[in-house]
Image (cartoon, grey):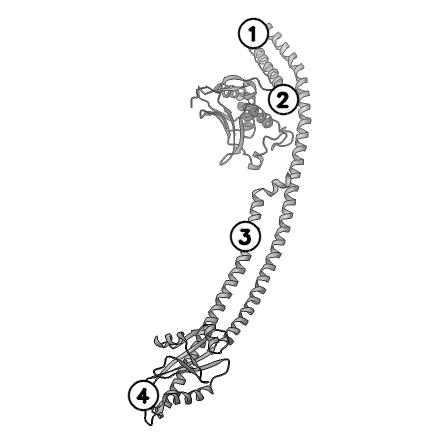
Amino acid sequence: MLLRSTRSSPAGSVRTGRRAGLLASMFLVVALVTALAYWDDERESAAALEDFAAEQSTLASSLAAGLSSYLATVHVRPPASRGEAVDAREATATLSVALGRIQRPGESLVLLQPPGSTDFRTTDGRVVTLDALSAALEAKGSSVRLTRGEAATLGLPERTAFAGLADVDGDGAGRWHIVSIATARRERDRAVRAAWRLVLSVGMASGLVLAFGGIALRNQRKELVLQREVAVLAVQSERDERLARAARAAVMGTFAMGIAHEVSTPLGVILGRAEQLLNRSTDDERAAHAARVIVEQAERLKLLVRRFLDLARGGVPTFARVDSSSVARGAVALVDHRFGKAGVRLTADVPSQLPVIQCDRALLEHALVNLLLNACEACEPGSNVDVTARSDGRDVAFVVADDGAGIRAEDAARATEPFFTTKPEGLGTGLGLAIASEIVKSHRGILTIEPRSPRGTRACIEIPVSPGAIGHA
């Protein structure tokens, strides 16, 4: 359970997101490098083929220039005519012999198309018909790319080939066309070798990226393991400390119950003696008033002791419908003399009418008294403490605000823990706010303590309004 809660924490989710982000970044880098390398390889391969096609076009133009020179020295007549002019078939045969010397078997080939013919003749006398060449000549193109099948028809390797095209005026007999064809096998083989080099380079780069990424992931995994162990130790330490505080609180609670029980006896004696003094002071009004005050406070202490013992035993407070404004005024009346003695001004802002609440008046008054006394002790003479009571129709809020030394946020979070105190040793037990917190919880309320700006402390008790009560702001 402990490990599962640690993994599902927000920090664990952030670490998981970092790991996923690192993996995604690694694969993105590898994919990007591969795509760029592939694009560059394809661009270079296409450029090499374009250069190869331009070479064939240049070669065809050079051959055309040579053919033009030859035709200028002889007069070629059509095959059907008679005379002393050279027959086109004879000229083709003569040119084929000359052109056959510049071609390379299995690599390059030269074709001639005499005037008036739709076929192409090879240097070895074969007649070839290629629609791609005819279409390119009609379109006045300078080069054309031949497919593998077309290259194989010409006796070249079954690889992509390029043809350079040129034509020459036959001096009235028509136009001669000359075609220089060469296979792009070497260029393609170089492209394949370059591709393999690319694959090896990308593979090595990817391997390095993945290796470094793996090292980073392993280090991150170790860091996560250490963080989880630290978190587990922290939770265990906090749990042990909480258990120790709970055990100490239980022991002190037992002592407190014993003390409260023992206090009942002297309280009964004080109450009895005060009642005797009250009966004997019929002629002395001052003494009678003092005796009545002693009786009232003794009765109040006796009631509080009984209620505390009930709470300690797990009992439920005795609730009654009470005017919440009377609770605030009663608490102020109980501590007014303490504020006068300390020289601290106490200002009460309590409306005459507030909603009715279900509460144990004695206990709730005591909780509010604890807050007021804490504020008084935190202030120096001349300081101010304000107590206000307000309602929003759902809850009644009793707020005690002082401009004393104040409290740190981390101490405010622990202020209601039993035996936690920021007072010097011997001046505080750390039980006042803890008791107030338990009283408020038993009333289904909330006690909050927080620092006040620019200085001081603000404590607030919120108690639900009794159902059906009408509130007055």
Q: What amino acid type should be assigned to the residue bearing mark 4?
A: Asp
- Which residue is depicted at the point 64% across and 31% down? 425
- Residue nearest the observer in this picture, 193 or 310: 193
Q: From the image, state whether disc 4 or disc 1 is nearer to you.
A: 4
Dot 1: few (<14), some (14–19), or many (≥20) neighbours within 10 Å?
few
Q: Of label 4 and label 2, which has the lower sequence position? A: 4
Q: Of label 3 and label 2, which has the lower sequence position? A: 3
Q: What amino acid type should be assigned to the residue bearing mark 1?
A: Asp
Q: Which mark is residue 21?
A: 3
Dot 3: few (<14), some (14–19), or many (≥20) neighbours within 10 Å?
few
Q: What amino acid type should be assigned to the residue bearing mark 2?
A: Gly
Q: From the image, state whether disc 1 or disc 2 is nearer to you.
A: 2
- Which residue is depicted at the point 66% across and 35% down? 241
Q: Which mark is residue 284?
A: 1
Q: Quick check: can you spot residue 48?
A: no
Q: Quadrant of the C terminus?
A: top left
Q: What amino acid type should be assigned to the residue bearing mark 3?
A: Gly
CA–CA distance between discs 4 and 2?
Answer: 127 Å
Q: Which residue is mark 4?
A: 171
The image position of residue 48, as x and y in percent, is: 47, 74
Q: Which residue is mark 2?
A: 314
Q: Of label 4 and label 3, which has the lower sequence position? A: 3
The image position of residue 63, as x and y in percent, is: 41, 85
Up-down relation of residue 194 to residue 437 (above or below): below
Element under disc 3: helix
- The quadrant in which residue 284 appears is top right
- The quadrant in which residue 13 appears is top right
The image position of residue 280, as x and y in percent, is: 60, 5
CA–CA distance between discs 1 and 3?
Answer: 88 Å
CA–CA distance between discs 3 and 2?
Answer: 53 Å
